[in-house]
Image (cartoon, rainbow, N blue to C red):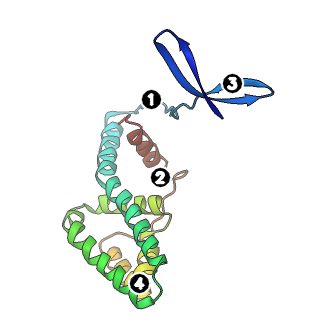
């Protein structure tokens, strides 16, 4: 691939090129264009329900994405550690830091926002909240938190299904990410 300059007078454009069957062809990369159907609602009640869902997703999506990036950081650090004791101490330290930083904000979430966060954490990490706790803190801790969650009408084992029941949520996230909402 070679860069060539094309244009006339003061309007020059530098583009990459490639040679294909002896011809030099400009190679220009475009950003992905996302096409989504326009929103239509059967009635006002459905529109209000959609607006509430958008609000809920906007509130918890940053936390889910942050959970994904923090998990990546923790996993990258753990890989370099040799002893289980060192890993446990590191995880406990990160646990305390994250609780200090986010416990107040997250405790103010409604039950439905909490359920949404659990699903979006699965979307962002590829693992349910239960699996993450079990992996990082152990089976007993995961069981305890699952019991607490169930007492409050939640479930840490909820999975995100972008093609099924969570298709509307996926559509909303796509629209948010592309500045359409």
Residue situated in front as seen by the camera: 54 or 29:
29
User: Can you identify the residue that label 1 sits on?
Assistant: 38
Q: Position of residue 40 (x, y in %)?
A: 42, 31
Q: Residue at x 37, y 63 (%)?
A: 67
Q: CA distance from mark 4 to mark 1?
A: 49 Å
Q: Earlier in the sequence, mark 3 or mark 2?
A: 3
Which of the labelled discs sits on residue 83, or is there none? none
User: Can you identify the residue that label 3 sits on?
Assistant: 25
**Residue 173, quarter of the rendered image:** top left
User: Can you identify the residue that label 2 sits on?
Assistant: 166
Q: Position of residue 125 (x, y in %)?
A: 46, 63
Q: Residue at x 46, y 68 (%)?
A: 128
Query: In the orientation shown, which residue stands out farthest toward the right?
Result: 21
Q: CA distance from mark 1 to mark 3?
A: 37 Å
Q: Earlier in the sequence, mark 1 or mark 2?
A: 1
Query: In the orientation shown, which residue stands out farthest toward the top?
Result: 9
Numbered disc 1: secondary structure: loop
User: Can you identify the residue that label 4 sits on?
Assistant: 87
Q: CA distance from mark 3 to mark 4?
A: 53 Å
């Amino acid at each position: 691939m070679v860069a060539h300059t094309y244009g006339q007078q003061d309007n020059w454009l530098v583009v990459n090129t490639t040679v294909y069957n002896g011809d030099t062809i400009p190679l220009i990369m475009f950003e992905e264009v996302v096409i989504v159907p326009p929103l239509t609602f059967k009635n006002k009640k459905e529109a209000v329900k959609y607006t509430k869902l958008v609000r809920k997703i906007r509130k918890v999506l940053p936390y889910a994405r942050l959970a994904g990036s923090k998990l990546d950081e923790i996993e990258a650090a753990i890989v370099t550690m040799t002893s289980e004791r060192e890993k446990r101490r590191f995880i406990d330290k990160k646990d305390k830091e994250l609780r200090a930083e986010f416990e107040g904000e997250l405790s103010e979430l409604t039950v439905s926002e909490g359920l949404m966060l659990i699903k979006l954490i699965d979307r962002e990490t590829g693992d349910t909240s239960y699996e993450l706790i079990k992996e990082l803190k152990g089976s007993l801790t995961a069981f305890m938190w699952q019991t607490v969650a169930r007492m409050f009408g939640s479930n840490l084992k909820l999975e995100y299904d972008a093609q099924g029941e969570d298709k509307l949520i996926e559509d909303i996230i796509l629209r948010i990410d592309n500045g359409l909402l």
